[in-house]
Image (spheres, helix red, strand yellow):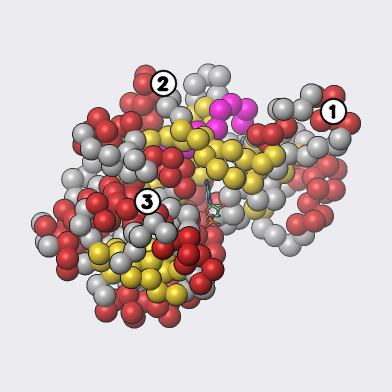
């Protein structure tokens, strides 16, 4: 049954758990892999076939080969970060997820419109540097994991700090003080159910390092905050917050159906935000695909353990959905 389709992805980000999940559900696996990573990835023996691919930007050239193999591509963060959005949308391939949602998640204005329509709190935006009157985080466009972001407090300070990033599109966003939390969801187009899979927190350099240095030294050393992600750690949030967070995820899915088509957002997705002392969750980003924080739970997440009674990672949950779709003759419903 699963033999008629294979599962394919690109060697980085969450590829290991995607391949492992596919294997666990009985699928053959294909890995698109740059030459210099072959040794590393082959040491896990998770790919039945490896196709040498220098960059995910070459996806359009390999698509024909993947189609012949009946391989379903599972997109992850590197697809958006290093590939071309246009190619990703236009290339003819079996793609798990709805590509129509990609323009909404990759454009910060549209993403914000989506969240607001879903009735979710978002940080205030400043449309010009001269209007900055509170702590602001300056964010660049694209999934670059916080690279280059900086904090600022007024126009003069902003003009100074933006010099090294001239020409790049940015957004001026109110800086929310609280605990940053990344919530991993999965929406099943087959059952119509949204699940909370897990949560993580990130380690970002150097904001997560500055607290190790006394305030006086931070000033003496003229340290500036930066937000380049280096890894993730598990986090379980108060159980009493889970029902509301699930509802927020459901609203994001429901709203997406009005924005694109009735399939809307499905598969794994993540809401990234900050929980404030008033227990308000401000969302600053949606990722419409598997996020790297799920790597913390390759051997299963707290909630999938409760629900499925076996170790289900997000990678495996994807494979389970595809398997069910094949079984029920509904494969079109998980492709987009
Ligand atoms: P990579 O293949 O590691 O370069 O990652 C692809 C994209 O995903 C980049 O934009 C990264 O910033 C982002 N990313 C990678 N690893 C993580 C992580 N552990 N947590 C959050 N984002 C990540
Ligand atoms: P993003 O690229 O939107 O995922 O943001 C990268 C990092 O910047 C996040 O992981 C947070 O640590 C931080 N961050 C982003 N937006 C805000 C915000 N509005 N308030 C506080 N921290 C933020």
Picture coordinates of residue 176 (x, y %)? 61, 31
On screen, 163 above or below 125?
below
| In magenta segment, residue 177 | yes
Give the percent coordinates (x, y) of residue 105: 47, 53
Which element carries disc 2, helix, strand or loop? loop
Select label 2 or label 3 by which is in front.
3
3 or 1: tag closer to the N-terminus: 3
Q: Taking 250 as reference, is 100 above or below it?
A: below
Q: Position of residue 182 (x, y in %)?
A: 47, 37
> Mark 3 packing: few (<14 Cα in 10 Å), some, or many (20+)?
many
Q: State yes or no: discs 1 and 2 in contact (Cβ < 8 Å).
A: no
Q: Tell me the magenta residue range.
A: 176-185
Lower position in the chain sequence, tag 2 or tag 3: 3
Q: Earlier in the sequence, mark 1 or mark 2?
A: 1
Residue toward you, 215 or 251: 215
| Real-space CA distance between mark 3 and mark 1, rounded to the nearest whole angstrom | 41 Å
Q: Residue at x 85, y 48 (%)?
A: 160
* Proximity of marks 3 and 1: CB atoms separated by less than 8 Å: no
Residue matched to label 2? 238
Foreground pick, 151 / 205? 205
The residue under the point 39% across, 47% down is: 269
Q: What number is the disc on residue 217?
A: 1
Left or right: 149 with respect to 238?
A: right
Residue under label 3, please give it.
Answer: 17
Q: Residue at x 50, y 70 (%)?
A: 34
């Amino acid at each position: 049954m699963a033999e008629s389709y294979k599962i394919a992805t690109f060697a980085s980000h969450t590829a290991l758990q995607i391949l492992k999940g596919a294997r666990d559900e009985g699928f053959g696996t294909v890995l698109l892999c740059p030459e210099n990573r072959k040794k590393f990835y082959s040491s896990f023996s998770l790919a039945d076939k490896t196709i040498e691919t220098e960059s995910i930007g070459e996806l359009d050239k390999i698509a024909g080969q993947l189609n012949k193999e009946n391989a379903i591509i599972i997109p992850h963060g590197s697809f958006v970060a290093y590939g071309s959005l246009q190619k990703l949308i236009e290339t003819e391939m079996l793609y798990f997820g709805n590509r129509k949602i990609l323009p909404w998640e990759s454009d910060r204005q549209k993403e914000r419109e989506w969240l607001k329509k879903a009735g979710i709190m978002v940080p205030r935006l400043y449309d010009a540097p001269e209007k900055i009157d509170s702590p602001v985080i300056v964010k660049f466009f694209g999934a670059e994991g916080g690279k280059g972001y900086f904090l600022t407090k007024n126009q003069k300070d902003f003009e100074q700090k933006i010099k090294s990033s001239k020409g790049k599109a940015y957004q001026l966003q109110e800086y929310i003080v609280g605990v940053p939390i990344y919530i991993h969801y999965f929406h099943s187009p087959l059952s119509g159910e949204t699940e909370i899979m897990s949560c993580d927190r990130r380690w970002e350099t150097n904001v997560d390092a500055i607290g190790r240095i006394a305030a006086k030294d931070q000033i003496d050393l003229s340290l500036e905050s930066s937000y380049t992600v280096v890894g993730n750690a598990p986090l379980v949030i108060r159980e009493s917050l889970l029902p509301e967070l699930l509802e927020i995820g459901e609203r994001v899915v429901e709203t997406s159906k009005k924005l694109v088509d009735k399939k809307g957002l499905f598969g794994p997705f993540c809401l990234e935000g900050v929980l404030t002392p008033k227990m308000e969750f401000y969302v600053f980003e949606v990722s419409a695909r598997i996020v790297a924080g799920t790597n913390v739970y390759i051997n299963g997440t707290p909630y999938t353990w409760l629900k499925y009674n076996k170790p289900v990672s997000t990678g495996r949950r994807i494979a389970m959905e595809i398997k069910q779709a094949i079984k029920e003759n509904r494969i079109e419903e998980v492709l987009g």
